[in-house]
Image: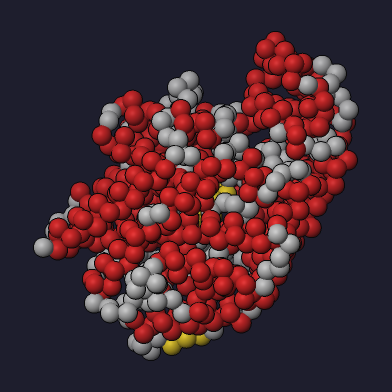
Amino acid sequence: MNHKIKKITLRILILTSSAIVIPFISFHAVSQDSVSTTNILYPTTSNTTTSNVTVWDLSDLYADQKHWQQAFDKSKLSVNALSQCRGTLADSAATLSTCLDTIYTSYRELLRVYTYAFLQKDTDLANSINSEHYTKVQSLLSEYSQAISFVEPELIAVGEKTLTGWLQKNKELADYRHFIRNTLRKGDHVLSPREEEILAAADDPMSAVSNTYSIFTNAELPWPEVTLSNGESVSLRASNYAKYRNAENRADRKIIFDAFFGTYQNYKETFASTLSGEVKWHVFSARMRGFDSSLQQAMDADNIPEAVYHTLVSTVNQNLDALHRYMKLRAERMKIDDLRYYDIYPSIIENKRSYSIDDSKAILVNALKPLGKEYGVQLRHALAQDWMHQYPAKGKRSGAYVMGAAYDAHPYMLLNHHNNFDSLSTFAHEWGHGMHTLLSNAAQPFPTAEYPTFIAEIASTANEVLLFDYLRGKAHNNEERLFYLFQELQGLRGTFFRQTQFAEFELAMHQEIERGEALSGDKLKRIYGDIVKRYYGEDQGAISIDDTYTVEWAYIPHFYRNFYVYQYATSISAAYYLTEKILNGGAAEREQYLSILKAGGSDYPYDILKRAGVDMASPEVYLAVIRRFNHIMEEIEALKQ
């Protein structure tokens, strides 16, 4: 079920270590009549950014487990009552408005219940009680989807002419204008009420595939113990791999890569089975709805032209020489004759500075000053709250994300902060998501507050671009400036090139299933290996990639989120374009940017961006990133002389 009212996308933006420096991207805005957020988000009297609490306070959702259970029971009753609207949507505009109010109120309450269970689960994935509660809410979400499966077919049956008339005459339907318009657009792919109900019911059992992957990799996979050159014994796991792959000692990096991907290699057929199951579900759903491909269905969800996907992949492929140049530059700077895949993560320039959470807060506040005084006040207030779960812990989910599904509360942030530069950039990235959620929720009513994924990464990436700009401006010498330049290159490598590489792989494995082929562990390694070696320039002598490491696809959780990863690459392109306008412009450019964050899901994301002068189906957007990438390398060459 693709519409926001049916597909629970939840504004949860997961950061994995696969894209950690300049990671994510996405968003734009152009809505000059967005509501001002002055004195709406927070009072302007609070300037503190310090909190001694390192774990989040879930009492803002529910006081305790007992109150959550009561809310769950109430939510279940509200979901069961939604069937009363079935068969009535054509009666009148007033009836339609009342039913949509009821449906969205139920959804709103359900998301709050979901958020609490989701956050509890992720702090201890081995806790069976938390897992049971989360599973219960997932089942209720499936029941909700089934309960409202009649909505789209009935609206389409009402017809465009009647609905247009109702929208013009009844202000009560104003908040649902985009939903109704989008439903009519999707008419050819909406099935009968009974068929919609069946597909909605299938969501719950099919979610077991991704759940199995998550639990296995984070809680039950038997990770190895490795001993590093300094004698340290490391229990390697998904949550700390990102830390140790940056090891200064090259032999240690090889040990980490061999052990980490060797573990995935040992279970490659299990991972191939779960990933194949997820892809088959995508393909099945697309066929049932009459789409030509799973890609077409995924792009259609937010009315994004398929040309965006294909233009991104083709433009990057035509300019891979820039990435090859960077690999050779790394090898030269690291004094390595045979660059290997385990050499692509460590910093080229040493930076021993520690960035605590409080350091990260202070730096971010200063870096984001170009976004204006009002934005800064809201950010400082948010940073002072107990909304973050900050440090790694046994059983805790790896990576980082912002969960902003509880509209009446506030976003929550999961971090695994290691007090290093990557942690600082991740912190900046995630607070882009956090502020996006706060601004959208303040400016939009609930039905249009949930912003599309396509624009969800722009604020986070723009934060990182402004962070790099700020840090370079404060550099005391060329060596420090070189550090930030290389870090920015790493971010572009990890988000623009790497996520496009992921997108190409994701499309290839879907096409395999669509052709009736099977996905085995060895086949996925071959497909992934061919792509990653081409991207990094193995044939051009830029790098060597061991066969064992081509099981890396099994490490990427985003492949369980249907055609999601490409939006990191599109978003970074949009973010660079927008921040350049902000830094070179004035208040108008800043407000244009902020209006995107306030636009929420009130329009199609591609249209929001295009009105802002960014056509994501044009090669020019991506070529701008290539030019920036090459310019940074030219600046590095100049500093070396």
Which residue sits furthest top? 169
Question: Residue 245 falls in which quadrant of the image?
Answer: bottom left
Which residue sits furthest left? 641
Residue 30 place in picture, x, y as percent: 45, 28
Asked whether 636 or 97 is in front, the reply is 636
**Residue 143 as seen in the image, left or right of residue 283:** right
Residue 99 place in picture, x, y as percent: 79, 26
State whether residue 238 appears in this view.
Answer: no
Residue at image coords 11%, 63%: 641
Asked whether 437 or 347 is in front, the reply is 347
Question: Residue 584 falls in which quadrant of the image?
Answer: top left
Image vertical order of residue 149 relative to residue 562, above or below: above
Question: Residue 515 falls in which quadrant of the image?
Answer: bottom right
Which image quarter holds the N terminus?
top right
Q: How many marks?
A: 0
Residue 434 place in picture, x, y as percent: 48, 44
Image vertical order of residue 58 relative to residue 343, above or below: above
Residue at image coords 52%, 51%: 566
Asked whether 559 or 76 is in front, the reply is 559
Residue at image coords 60%, 70%: 524
Residue at image coords 47%, 86%: 226
Image vertical order of residue 268 relative to residue 150, above or below: below
State whether residue 538 appears in this view.
Answer: yes
**Residue 89 as seen in the image, left or right of residue 344:** right
